Amino acid sequence: MKQDTAVIFYSPLFKHNAAPAFPPDASWLHIFLIDEQSALQTGGLHSYQTALSASDLAQAESRKSERSKQTYVISRVALKRLIAEALHLEEINAIRLGIEAGGKPYIVEPKSQLHFNVSHSQGRIAIGLSYDRKIGIDLEYIDKTRRYERIAEHYFHQTERAWVNGDNANSFYQLWTLKEALVKAEGRGMAIPFNAFYFKNLQDYSFIPEPRTALDPHAWMFRHSIIENTYSLSVAYETLPDFSKPAASVWKYVHNKGFIPQPTAW
Protein backbone atom coordinates (compact mmCIF):
# COMPACT_ATOMS: atom_id res chain seq x y z
CA MET A 1 0.00 0.00 0.00
CA LYS A 2 1.23 3.49 -0.75
CA GLN A 3 -0.10 6.67 0.75
CA ASP A 4 -0.03 10.16 -0.73
CA THR A 5 -1.18 12.89 1.70
CA ALA A 6 -4.75 11.98 2.70
CA VAL A 7 -5.41 9.61 -0.20
CA ILE A 8 -5.31 5.90 0.53
CA PHE A 9 -4.43 3.48 -2.28
CA TYR A 10 -5.49 -0.10 -1.66
CA SER A 11 -3.40 -3.09 -2.55
CA PRO A 12 -4.80 -5.84 -4.82
CA LEU A 13 -7.30 -8.13 -3.13
CA PHE A 14 -4.97 -11.05 -2.45
CA LYS A 15 -2.02 -9.15 -1.03
CA HIS A 16 -1.95 -8.39 2.67
CA ASN A 17 -0.44 -5.24 4.14
CA ALA A 18 0.31 -4.97 7.83
CA ALA A 19 -0.23 -1.20 7.72
CA PRO A 20 -3.80 0.00 8.32
CA ALA A 21 -5.67 0.23 5.03
CA PHE A 22 -8.41 2.55 6.23
CA PRO A 23 -8.24 6.21 7.25
CA PRO A 24 -7.84 6.52 11.04
CA ASP A 25 -11.17 8.34 11.47
CA ALA A 26 -13.50 5.47 12.33
CA SER A 27 -16.62 7.53 11.62
CA TRP A 28 -16.02 7.36 7.86
CA LEU A 29 -18.20 5.37 5.49
CA HIS A 30 -16.20 3.28 3.02
CA ILE A 31 -17.76 2.36 -0.33
CA PHE A 32 -15.99 -0.01 -2.75
CA LEU A 33 -16.93 -0.56 -6.39
CA ILE A 34 -15.75 -3.60 -8.32
CA ASP A 35 -16.00 -4.30 -12.04
CA GLU A 36 -16.14 -8.10 -12.27
CA GLN A 37 -14.23 -8.24 -15.55
CA SER A 38 -11.45 -6.04 -14.18
CA ALA A 39 -11.27 -8.20 -11.06
CA LEU A 40 -10.97 -11.37 -13.14
CA GLN A 41 -7.83 -10.01 -14.81
CA THR A 42 -6.06 -10.52 -11.48
CA GLY A 43 -5.82 -14.24 -12.19
CA GLY A 44 -9.14 -15.53 -13.44
CA LEU A 45 -12.05 -16.96 -11.50
CA HIS A 46 -9.96 -19.91 -10.30
CA SER A 47 -7.71 -17.59 -8.27
CA TYR A 48 -10.78 -16.37 -6.40
CA GLN A 49 -12.18 -19.86 -5.90
CA THR A 50 -8.95 -21.13 -4.33
CA ALA A 51 -9.11 -18.29 -1.79
CA LEU A 52 -12.49 -19.40 -0.44
CA SER A 53 -13.46 -21.97 2.16
CA ALA A 54 -15.34 -25.16 1.29
CA SER A 55 -18.57 -23.74 2.72
CA ASP A 56 -18.28 -20.59 0.61
CA LEU A 57 -17.64 -22.67 -2.51
CA ALA A 58 -20.70 -24.79 -1.72
CA GLN A 59 -22.77 -21.61 -1.50
CA ALA A 60 -21.40 -20.52 -4.87
CA GLU A 61 -22.31 -23.85 -6.46
CA SER A 62 -25.88 -23.53 -5.18
CA ARG A 63 -26.39 -20.55 -7.52
CA LYS A 64 -28.36 -21.44 -10.63
CA SER A 65 -26.39 -19.63 -13.35
CA GLU A 66 -22.67 -19.45 -14.06
CA ARG A 67 -22.90 -15.65 -13.99
CA SER A 68 -24.41 -15.63 -10.49
CA LYS A 69 -21.77 -18.12 -9.30
CA GLN A 70 -19.04 -15.82 -10.60
CA THR A 71 -20.58 -12.78 -8.92
CA TYR A 72 -20.88 -14.62 -5.61
CA VAL A 73 -17.26 -15.82 -5.68
CA ILE A 74 -15.79 -12.42 -6.55
CA SER A 75 -17.98 -10.52 -4.10
CA ARG A 76 -17.28 -13.00 -1.29
CA VAL A 77 -13.52 -12.80 -1.70
CA ALA A 78 -13.61 -9.01 -2.01
CA LEU A 79 -15.82 -8.66 1.06
CA LYS A 80 -13.67 -10.95 3.20
CA ARG A 81 -10.49 -9.28 1.95
CA LEU A 82 -11.83 -5.85 2.94
CA ILE A 83 -13.04 -7.08 6.33
CA ALA A 84 -9.61 -8.63 6.90
CA GLU A 85 -7.96 -5.30 6.03
CA ALA A 86 -10.28 -3.44 8.40
CA LEU A 87 -9.70 -5.87 11.28
CA HIS A 88 -5.99 -6.43 10.51
CA LEU A 89 -6.39 -10.17 9.91
CA GLU A 90 -3.89 -12.24 7.93
CA GLU A 91 -6.30 -14.96 6.77
CA ILE A 92 -9.65 -14.24 5.14
CA ASN A 93 -11.07 -17.64 6.04
CA ALA A 94 -10.72 -16.75 9.71
CA ILE A 95 -13.83 -14.68 8.98
CA ARG A 96 -17.18 -16.44 9.34
CA LEU A 97 -20.31 -14.65 8.19
CA GLY A 98 -23.92 -15.28 9.12
CA ILE A 99 -27.40 -14.09 8.13
CA GLU A 100 -29.84 -12.42 10.52
CA ALA A 101 -33.54 -13.33 10.50
CA GLY A 102 -34.33 -10.40 8.20
CA GLY A 103 -31.67 -11.45 5.70
CA LYS A 104 -28.94 -9.01 6.73
CA PRO A 105 -25.40 -10.47 6.78
CA TYR A 106 -23.13 -9.97 9.78
CA ILE A 107 -19.75 -11.09 11.11
CA VAL A 108 -20.00 -14.18 13.33
CA GLU A 109 -16.25 -14.61 13.88
CA PRO A 110 -14.15 -12.83 14.94
CA LYS A 111 -16.39 -10.75 17.18
CA SER A 112 -16.50 -7.24 15.76
CA GLN A 113 -18.64 -4.10 15.65
CA LEU A 114 -17.82 -3.61 11.96
CA HIS A 115 -20.93 -3.15 9.82
CA PHE A 116 -21.10 -4.04 6.13
CA ASN A 117 -23.49 -4.51 3.25
CA VAL A 118 -23.20 -5.77 -0.33
CA SER A 119 -25.08 -5.22 -3.58
CA HIS A 120 -24.45 -6.18 -7.19
CA SER A 121 -25.96 -5.51 -10.60
CA GLN A 122 -24.95 -6.26 -14.19
CA GLY A 123 -21.25 -6.96 -13.65
CA ARG A 124 -20.67 -4.44 -10.86
CA ILE A 125 -20.36 -5.10 -7.13
CA ALA A 126 -20.72 -2.50 -4.36
CA ILE A 127 -19.54 -3.09 -0.79
CA GLY A 128 -20.13 -0.68 2.09
CA LEU A 129 -18.22 -0.77 5.39
CA SER A 130 -18.68 1.27 8.55
CA TYR A 131 -16.96 0.97 11.90
CA ASP A 132 -19.59 2.62 14.06
CA ARG A 133 -23.03 2.60 12.43
CA LYS A 134 -25.43 0.32 10.58
CA ILE A 135 -25.20 0.63 6.81
CA GLY A 136 -27.21 -0.54 3.81
CA ILE A 137 -26.22 -0.25 0.16
CA ASP A 138 -28.03 -0.83 -3.11
CA LEU A 139 -26.67 -0.72 -6.65
CA GLU A 140 -28.91 -1.00 -9.71
CA TYR A 141 -28.19 -0.90 -13.42
CA ILE A 142 -30.32 1.86 -14.97
CA ASP A 143 -32.36 -0.06 -17.53
CA LYS A 144 -34.41 2.53 -19.42
CA THR A 145 -36.32 -0.19 -21.28
CA ARG A 146 -37.77 -1.53 -18.05
CA ARG A 147 -41.45 -0.82 -17.38
CA TYR A 148 -40.58 1.09 -14.24
CA GLU A 149 -43.83 3.09 -14.15
CA ARG A 150 -45.77 -0.15 -13.62
CA ILE A 151 -43.30 -1.23 -10.91
CA ALA A 152 -43.67 2.17 -9.22
CA GLU A 153 -47.46 1.80 -9.28
CA HIS A 154 -47.14 -1.43 -7.33
CA TYR A 155 -44.26 -0.64 -4.95
CA PHE A 156 -44.10 3.13 -4.42
CA HIS A 157 -46.21 5.37 -2.25
CA GLN A 158 -48.72 7.47 -4.19
CA THR A 159 -46.77 10.63 -3.31
CA GLU A 160 -43.72 9.28 -5.14
CA ARG A 161 -45.37 7.90 -8.27
CA ALA A 162 -45.62 11.27 -10.02
CA TRP A 163 -41.83 11.58 -9.91
CA VAL A 164 -41.36 8.62 -12.25
CA ASN A 165 -44.05 9.39 -14.82
CA GLY A 166 -42.71 9.80 -18.34
CA ASP A 167 -39.00 9.53 -19.08
CA ASN A 168 -37.77 9.53 -15.48
CA ALA A 169 -35.74 6.34 -15.20
CA ASN A 170 -33.11 8.06 -13.05
CA SER A 171 -35.74 9.16 -10.53
CA PHE A 172 -37.22 5.67 -10.41
CA TYR A 173 -33.85 4.03 -9.73
CA GLN A 174 -32.89 6.71 -7.24
CA LEU A 175 -36.06 6.04 -5.25
CA TRP A 176 -35.74 2.27 -5.58
CA THR A 177 -32.13 2.19 -4.38
CA LEU A 178 -32.83 4.61 -1.52
CA LYS A 179 -35.67 2.40 -0.30
CA GLU A 180 -33.69 -0.80 -0.77
CA ALA A 181 -30.68 0.63 1.06
CA LEU A 182 -32.86 1.67 4.00
CA VAL A 183 -34.61 -1.67 4.51
CA LYS A 184 -31.26 -3.47 4.17
CA ALA A 185 -29.60 -1.18 6.73
CA GLU A 186 -32.53 -1.51 9.13
CA GLY A 187 -32.29 -5.28 8.92
CA ARG A 188 -35.84 -6.37 8.08
CA GLY A 189 -35.46 -6.25 4.31
CA MET A 190 -38.62 -6.61 2.23
CA ALA A 191 -40.65 -7.26 5.38
CA ILE A 192 -40.97 -3.46 5.29
CA PRO A 193 -43.20 -2.70 2.26
CA PHE A 194 -41.74 -0.03 -0.01
CA ASN A 195 -45.10 1.77 -0.15
CA ALA A 196 -45.30 1.98 3.66
CA PHE A 197 -42.89 4.91 3.73
CA TYR A 198 -42.21 7.71 1.28
CA PHE A 199 -39.56 10.31 0.61
CA LYS A 200 -40.78 13.91 0.74
CA ASN A 201 -38.28 14.94 -1.93
CA LEU A 202 -35.12 13.75 -3.65
CA GLN A 203 -32.88 16.49 -2.28
CA ASP A 204 -32.52 16.02 1.48
CA TYR A 205 -33.99 12.47 1.55
CA SER A 206 -36.26 13.05 4.52
CA PHE A 207 -38.96 10.38 4.62
CA ILE A 208 -42.33 9.75 6.25
CA PRO A 209 -43.03 6.21 7.53
CA GLU A 210 -46.38 4.68 8.33
CA PRO A 211 -46.69 3.59 12.00
CA ARG A 212 -46.75 -0.10 11.01
CA THR A 213 -43.15 0.13 9.81
CA ALA A 214 -41.79 1.19 13.24
CA LEU A 215 -39.17 3.19 11.32
CA ASP A 216 -37.68 6.27 12.96
CA PRO A 217 -37.19 8.93 10.24
CA HIS A 218 -34.60 10.70 12.41
CA ALA A 219 -32.46 7.58 12.76
CA TRP A 220 -31.27 7.38 9.15
CA MET A 221 -29.33 9.44 6.63
CA PHE A 222 -28.75 8.82 2.92
CA ARG A 223 -26.41 9.41 0.02
CA HIS A 224 -26.98 8.77 -3.65
CA SER A 225 -24.89 8.96 -6.80
CA ILE A 226 -25.04 7.96 -10.46
CA ILE A 227 -22.00 5.78 -11.21
CA GLU A 228 -20.45 5.69 -14.69
CA ASN A 229 -23.68 7.28 -16.01
CA THR A 230 -25.10 3.76 -15.89
CA TYR A 231 -25.69 2.66 -12.30
CA SER A 232 -27.72 4.13 -9.45
CA LEU A 233 -26.03 3.78 -6.05
CA SER A 234 -27.63 4.60 -2.70
CA VAL A 235 -26.31 4.27 0.83
CA ALA A 236 -28.41 4.42 4.02
CA TYR A 237 -26.62 4.72 7.33
CA GLU A 238 -27.46 5.12 10.97
CA THR A 239 -27.50 8.59 12.52
CA LEU A 240 -25.36 8.81 15.64
CA PRO A 241 -26.59 10.77 18.70
CA ASP A 242 -24.73 13.92 17.61
CA PHE A 243 -26.50 13.76 14.19
CA SER A 244 -23.14 13.97 12.49
CA LYS A 245 -22.82 13.39 8.76
CA PRO A 246 -19.77 11.17 8.32
CA ALA A 247 -17.15 11.68 5.68
CA ALA A 248 -17.42 9.12 2.89
CA SER A 249 -14.76 7.59 0.70
CA VAL A 250 -15.43 5.81 -2.59
CA TRP A 251 -12.92 3.48 -4.27
CA LYS A 252 -13.04 1.55 -7.51
CA TYR A 253 -11.11 -1.65 -8.08
CA VAL A 254 -8.70 -1.33 -11.01
CA HIS A 255 -6.60 -4.21 -12.33
CA ASN A 256 -2.95 -4.04 -11.12
CA LYS A 257 -3.72 -1.00 -8.95
CA GLY A 258 -6.18 -2.35 -6.42
CA PHE A 259 -8.70 0.13 -5.04
CA ILE A 260 -8.11 3.71 -6.08
CA PRO A 261 -10.12 6.79 -5.01
CA GLN A 262 -13.03 7.78 -7.22
CA PRO A 263 -14.58 11.25 -7.44
CA THR A 264 -18.22 10.84 -6.48
CA ALA A 265 -20.86 13.55 -6.17
CA TRP A 266 -22.71 12.97 -2.91
Image (cartoon, rainbow, N blue to C red):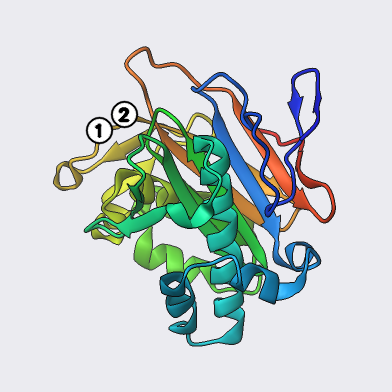
Tell me if I can see residue 212 in this picture: yes
Disc 2 + disc 1, Cβ < 8 Å:
yes
Q: Please identify the residue farthest to the left as the structure is shown.
A: 212
Nearer to me, 85 or 26: 85
Q: What residue would you read off at disc 2? A: 219
Residue 22 x %, y %:
61, 30
* Rendered residue at 49%/76% (across/down): 57
Nearer to me, 89 or 64: 89
Residue 17 x %, y %:
68, 38
Task: Name the kind of residue labelled 2 in the image.
Answer: Ala
Q: What residue would you read off at disc 1? A: 216
**Mark 1 burial class by Cα count in 10 Å: few <14, some 14-19, many 20+:** few
Q: Is residue 59 above or below residue 38?
A: below
Task: Name the kind of residue labelled 1 in the image.
Answer: Asp
* Rendered residue at 61%/75% (across/down): 70
Tell me if I can see residue 173 in this picture: no
Residue 89 x %, y %:
52, 42
Classify mark 1: helix, strand or loop: loop
Left or right of 66 on screen, residue 253: right
Left or right of 266 on screen, residue 220: left
Query: Is the N terminus in the top left, top right, bottom left or bottom right quadrant?
Result: top right
**Mark 2 burial class by Cα count in 10 Å: few <14, some 14-19, many 20+:** few
Q: Is residue 183 above or below residue 18?
A: below
